Amino acid sequence: MIAYRTMRNPSDSPVAEAEQLTKTLRGPQGVLRILSGVDLAVRPGEAVAILGASGAGKSTLLGLLAGLDSPTGGHVRLLGQELDRIDEDARAALRSGRVGFVFQSFLLLPGLTALENVMLPLELDGVGRDTPDRALQALARVGLEDRARHYPRQLSGGEQQRVAIARAFAPGPRVLFADEPTGNLDEATGHRVIELMLGLREASGCALVMVTHDKELTRDCDHRFRLHGGALEPC
Amino acid sequence: MSKLLRMGLRGAWRDWRSGEMRLLALALVVAVAALSAVGFFTDRLERAMGLQAAELLGADLVVSAPVPIRVTLRARAAQLGLELAETVDFPSVVLSGDRTTLVQVKAVGRGYPLRGRLQISDERLGPGRETRSLPAPGTVWVESRLLDLVGLVPGASIALGDADLSISRILRHEPDRGGQLFRLAPRVLLSMGDLETTGLLTPTSRARYRLLLAGPPEAVASYRRWLDRHRSPQETVADVDSARPEVRTALEQARRYLGLAALVAVLVAGAAVSLSARHYAARQLDAVALMRCLGASRGRVLCLFGLRLLCVGLLAGLVGLAAGFLAQLGLAGLLRGWFLEALPAPGPAPVLTGLFTAVLTLMGFALPPIQRLAEVPPLRVMRGELGPAPPSAWVTGVAAGLALFLLLAWQTRETEASLKILVGAMGLVGVLWALGAVSIALLRHGPWRGTWRWAVKRLCDPGNHAVLQLCGLAVGITALLVLGVLRVELVERWRTSLPERSPNHFLIGIQMDEGPELDALFSRHGLEAPVYHPIVRGRLVAINDRAVEPEHYEGLRARRLAAREFNLTWARRLATDNRVVAGRWWEETPGVGFSVEEGIARTLGIRLGDRPSFLIAGAKLSAPVTSLREVDWESFRPNFFVIASPGLLSGAPASLMTAFYLDPEQQGFIAELARGFPGVTDIDVDMVLRQVRGIMDRAALAIEYVFGFTLLAGAVVMFAAIEVGLAGRRRGIALKRALGASRGRILKGLTVEFALLGALAGALSALMASIAGHWITTQVFELSALPSPWLWLWGIAGAVTGVVTVGIVGTRRLLDQPPWPILQQANG
């Protein structure tokens, strides 16, 4: 199996790396093989898209790379740390302030305003008194500073996703994981959201691993892979 | 740590703002308000006892005896430079025209009271003023209650024994009398000089002589040490620390029973806390998963939510304390003047109790579901079906039980009693739960149609927590129904259980030579000649030559019996309502000895063959116990704990007593009796029963007042259950409205649903109250029990009305929401 490693700068250590990654699940009809010996390395600053049909295992791969799940076989390194050598809490600490997330369902907390949602990772990371200012700046970067005091129910789908993007970028992460970020948006809004996300990534220099089923959205990514039958192949 | 605290506080504020924890907070407010209302009230009583201890005695030290105070006691006090005052009090009868009433006479000497002040007024409803003076010769000061009883006004005359005295002032406050609980008869205060003119004091009077002493603490202590070495067995001593044991006992009982009633509210509120906390935790799963994604460790999640819970708990605790403070004003109003006249402001202790209650209730009922949040896997952000299992019923039960046990132990100050109460309460809840579950199961399978079918389905939906709501409501309603039955029916039931024409008047203090004259009076009024029972007052001082000291006995009753004077009598024949259970009656076997009632023998540790010694008029008399008796006290005829064989008590100062039935129309007999026999005291049983009924009424009202918190807590359980099922209810209503149901039809469905819940709760409560009421009536009070249909009527009607009101208030807002946005949201 050839290891697919992105080749921007061979001397930069990958921010996220999978080596012979395997994930199986036991179901009523026996063992279900979701991933089979996947190899992937994402370098700093790169944008990587993982494509595949619904149910191909894209989100599963993303979850493993982000340390949210444990593989059945193989290894995952995130920010240089081998994940199977550390426990759940240590993984959380690793992610704090360094890893951002954007989800299909936005996952904004309904009881918090847009500003407070963006402040959440900063507060968890222990940022000090300038947390609200930094959060407001993040909202400004996505063009929503005047909606800072609005609740998610008062925002459209596209606006909610932009708030989620602001939240993801606010702490200055080294890698951002996006799981079907446009899945709940119409086509036009989806494109705008992707443009925004990629633009912010470029400006901040963080890596991006994006999972999507829409090839059109991945035009501006540095590398594209397809997940099929549990295996990862370049597009 | 400070960042964590700030984050926790911010989180708590956001939760409060979004209404997430409002029901949980409301449940805590009810729990804290219930306990702190009782806590503030009893704290005021205890502080009054502490601050006013010397006033409650009227002195720093009081020596009391059934005989005149010895000269040596006065002399010693004078030697030490102590201030002195003396009082004598005894029951008697006041005559005004043809009206008589039992009074408690108190003659006071110069200097009384040594601590505290008397308060008097010139008119019945006039303003009171403190005074250092005493009644002038020929006058009396009386409680206003006496004026009502005999229809008098200030300035009128009353006959007290051989003296005619005019009422010059209304007595408003007497520092050493205590509250209304301890005043059966109204007070008549006169100067010591007038006592002799009344001619009421005889060797057989039930008078209590008191020597009051006050002075510098060292002198009082020195006197006390001397007195302990020289005290006669008839003399009892009370100082500031042991002042008014009956008030302290009543206070302790009030604290215990009111506190237990309040704890029932805490139990029900705990159910609401648990339900709200589970619902809150379920809504936080996504947020916690996100936080775990973004770097929060399990410990951090636990700290953050623990801090939020604590903030809400402390805030709710403070609000609960404020509500409890206001509520205790109601309690103080209900029991005004019962224990003590004036109550100071409460101290800080109840505040600590209130906050402790809030924290403990949170830990016992809210912590288990909140603690599970730490186990939310971060992968839930991608796989929404992932999540921690809810806490097991076992863990929830143990946590709640432990919290309740600690609260009980704090309240009762007894570990064993707390454990028993907890087990009993859990058993009761278990029975309620089982009955509730069976009722819901039967309801689910009934032949319902139309609106009723939808209402029953909604009610029986597992997400509706119907059984929990039933239990929460039934606990409070059951308690109120039981109290209502006891308050309204018990005294009446007891009264009607007595044989017809049972004695309703008791005469005491009849001189030995007044018998024939009294017989003539009875005959003149067409009454049957009375049967007289001789009475000799004696104090138990030893058993088998071992001195009897009240402190040697454990129970309160035993100590009281060991400290009191006995009414000894003698008889040749065994009364028909007495039965010898051990030994032999002397009619069969002539002999010298005592026959003792079996219950008191057991309490005081007297066995057949023992030799009790009684101190009678300064002389000791011993004799063996030759029989033990069982007495039928329900016969309401005069009966005695200790009966001496004929001749054993000869030479001892004795008086006579009798009991008889008097028709209400024959009150003229009592007036003539009071005029002709001023030393005889008439005890009107009906008047006593009215007093007892009044006391029971107030006590029950006070406990019902506290149980009102339980009803409130039950309502919060309902609100919490409605909140839990709100999303599903909202979608269902939106769908029905989209399909054409009118608001009226939906409202009808809601009303039917809550009416069914109320009817079930009311029926369960009436059933439990019937069983509890039956047990208390037959086993505790040994009366015959009669079914009470009113219990079922009030229980069901009251519950239906209350539950429908609360339910409609809680769900009404759903009727006003437009259905389309709700349906869109549900569609994702």
Image: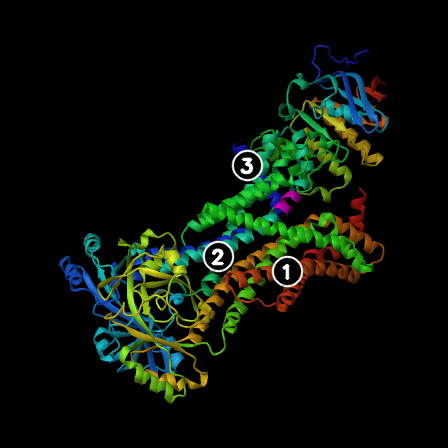
Sequence-earlier tag: 3 or 1? 3
Chain of the residue on which disc 2 is drawn: B
Figure quadrant of residue B94: bottom left
Residue underneath mark 2: B258
The mark lying in front, picked from 2 and 3, is 2
Is residue B816 visible to us here? no
Q: CA distance from mark 3 to mark 1?
A: 52 Å
Residue underneath mark 3: B6
Chain of the residue on which disc 3 is drawn: B
Q: Is the residue under label 3 in contact with that under label 2 (CB below 8 Å)?
A: no
Sequence-earlier tag: 2 or 3? 3
The mark lying in front, picked from 2 and 1, is 1
Sequence-earlier tag: 2 or 1? 2
Whether residue A149 sits left or right of residue B651 in the image: it is right
Whether residue A9 sits left or right of residue B7 in the image: it is right
Q: Amino acid at mark 3?
A: Arg
Q: CA distance from mark 2 to mark 3?
A: 40 Å
Reply yes or no: does residue B324 show up in magenta.
no
Q: Amino acid at mark 1?
A: Leu
Q: Amino acid at mark 2?
A: Leu
Chain of the residue on which disc 1 is drawn: B
Q: What residue is at 34 percent from the left and 84 percent from the top?
A: B519
Q: Quadrant of the image for the C terminus of chain B?
A: top right
Q: Using the image, determine if residue B504 lies above or below residue A187.
A: below
Q: Secondary structure at mark 3?
A: helix
Q: Secondary structure at mark 1?
A: helix
- Measured as percent of width and height from the top left, residue B140 is found at 28, 77
Q: Residues within 10 Å of mark 2 (few under 14, many from 20)?
A: many
The mark lying in front, picked from 3 and 1, is 1
Say which mark, if any, is on residue B767. Answer: 1
